C-alpha cells in the first residue's frame, strides 16, 4: 500500500512561476526523498531530507519537512518547461529486518508551459 | 555509464508466456529493490535483496513471480504464465548500506511489459 499522498495530483503553470507540491504520510519515517520522473522513464533522485531536518535546498529546489504534521513540501522556483514531469515523494522507513524501504505516493504531474 | 541498468527496456508478450527481466545495480551497492509501476500511479514495492539474500517479498508478488540475485550482483525477475494484469513498468533500484544517515536509492530506467 502507498504511504504518501501528493497534493495536488496535477499542476499547470507558466514558465518562471514557482511550483509547490505537498506530500503527507502516515507513519514515522527515517527520511523522506523526492524523485522526478519524465514520461516513460525511470525515477531520478532529487533530494533527501532526514527526519531531524526541517528544510533543505538544492539549486532551484527547496524541501521542507514537518514531522509533527507528517508532511513535506517541494518548491521549484523559476520553473522551466524542462521541469515538466511527475514528482513523487517517498518515505523511507526502517523495517524489522533492519533495512530501509521506500514507499511512494501517487505523484504530482507538473506541466510548465512556455 | 555507472547507473542502474535494466534490460530489456520493452517487452511485448502473449498471455501465458514467461518473461525475465535483468537488473545490473551500481557496482558497489549491496542492496537491490524491485518495484512495479502502472500508469498514473507511484512505484509499488515488490521485493528486496541484501547481497544475495532476499529479505522481503510483497504480497503483490504472487507465486508466478520469482526474483533472484545469485551472486549478490545482478538480479533477475521472472514472471511465469503472464496475465494482462501484469502489464506495467518494472523498476529496479539499488543503494549502499548507510544506516545512520539514510540511503539514497537509485533507480534504473525500467522495463516495460505489455501482455497481449
Image (tube, helix red, strand yellow):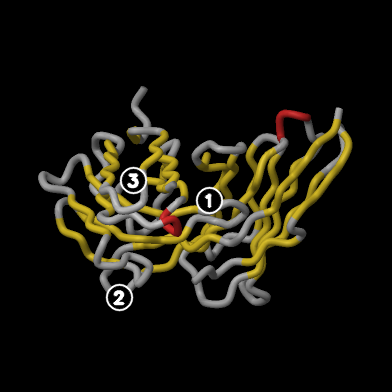
Residue at 26% over, 71% down:
A97
> Comparing marks 1 and 3, which lies closer to the viewer?
3
Viewer-proximal residue among A100 and B107:
B107
- Residue at the image position 49 percent from the left and 53 percent from the top: B37
Is the residue marked by circle 1 packed among few (<14), some (14-19), or many (20+) residues within 10 Å?
Answer: many
Badge 1 or badge 2: first in the primary sequence = 1
- Binning the other alpha carbons within 10 Å of mark 3 as few (below 14), some (14 to 19) or many (20 upward) gives many
Q: Give the answer, above or below, for where B2 lies relative to B96.
A: above
Question: In the displayed image of the protein, which residue is found farthest to the top?
Answer: B1
Chain letter of disc 1 in the image = A
Residue B67 screen position, x and y as percent: 23, 54
| Tag 1 residue | A48
Where's residue A64, x and y in %? Answer: 68, 57
Query: Considering the numbered disc 2 on the image, is that residue within a helix, a strand or a loop?
Result: loop
The residue under label 3 is B94
Label 2 sits on residue: A96
Let me know if residue A49 appears in the view: yes
Give above or below for A96 relative to B10: below
User: Are callouts 1 and 2 both on one chain?
Assistant: yes
Which residue is more in the foreground, B57 or A89? B57
Residue at (53, 51) in percent of width and height: A48
Image position of A6 with respect to A109: above or below: below
Can you say whether A33 is above or below A86 in the image?
below
Amino acid at each position: 500500500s502507498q504511504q504518501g499522498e501528493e497534493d495536488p495530483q496535477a499542476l499547470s503553470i507558466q514558465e518562471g512561476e514557482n511550483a509547490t507540491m505537498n506530500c503527507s504520510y502516515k507513519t514515522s519515517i527515517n527520511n523522506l526523498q523526492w524523485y522526478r520522473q519524465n514520461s516513460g522513464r525511470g525515477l531520478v533522485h532529487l533530494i533527501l531530507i532526514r527526519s531531524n531536518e526541517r528544510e533543505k535546498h538544492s539549486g532551484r529546489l527547496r524541501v521542507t519537512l514537518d514531522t509533527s504534521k507528517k508532511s513535506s513540501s517541494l518548491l521549484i522556483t523559476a520553473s522551466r518547461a524542462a521541469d515538466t514531469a511527475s514528482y513523487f515523494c517517498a518515505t523511507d522507513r526502517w523495517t524489522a529486518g533492519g533495512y530501509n524501504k521506500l514507499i511512494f505516493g501517487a505523484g504530482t504531474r507538473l506541466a510548465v508551459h512556455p | 555509464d555507472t547507473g542502474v541498468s535494466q534490460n530489456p527496456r520493452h517487452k511485448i508478450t502473449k498471455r501465458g508466456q514467461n518473461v525475465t527481466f535483468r537488473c545490473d545495480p551500481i557496482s558497489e551497492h549491496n542492496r537491490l529493490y524491485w518495484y512495479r509501476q502502472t500508469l498514473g500511479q507511484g512505484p509499488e514495492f515488490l521485493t528486496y535483496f541484501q547481497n544475495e539474500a532476499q529479505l522481503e517479498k510483497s504480497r503483490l508478488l504472487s507465486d508466478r513471480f520469482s526474483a533472484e540475485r545469485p551472486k549478490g550482483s545482478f538480479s533477475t525477475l521472472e514472471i511465469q504464465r503472464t496475465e494482462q494484469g501484469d502489464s506495467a513498468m518494472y523498476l529496479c533500484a539499488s543503494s549502499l548500506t548507510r544506516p545512520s544517515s539514510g540511503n539514497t536509492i537509485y533507480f534504473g530506467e525500467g522495463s516495460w511489459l505489455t501482455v497481449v
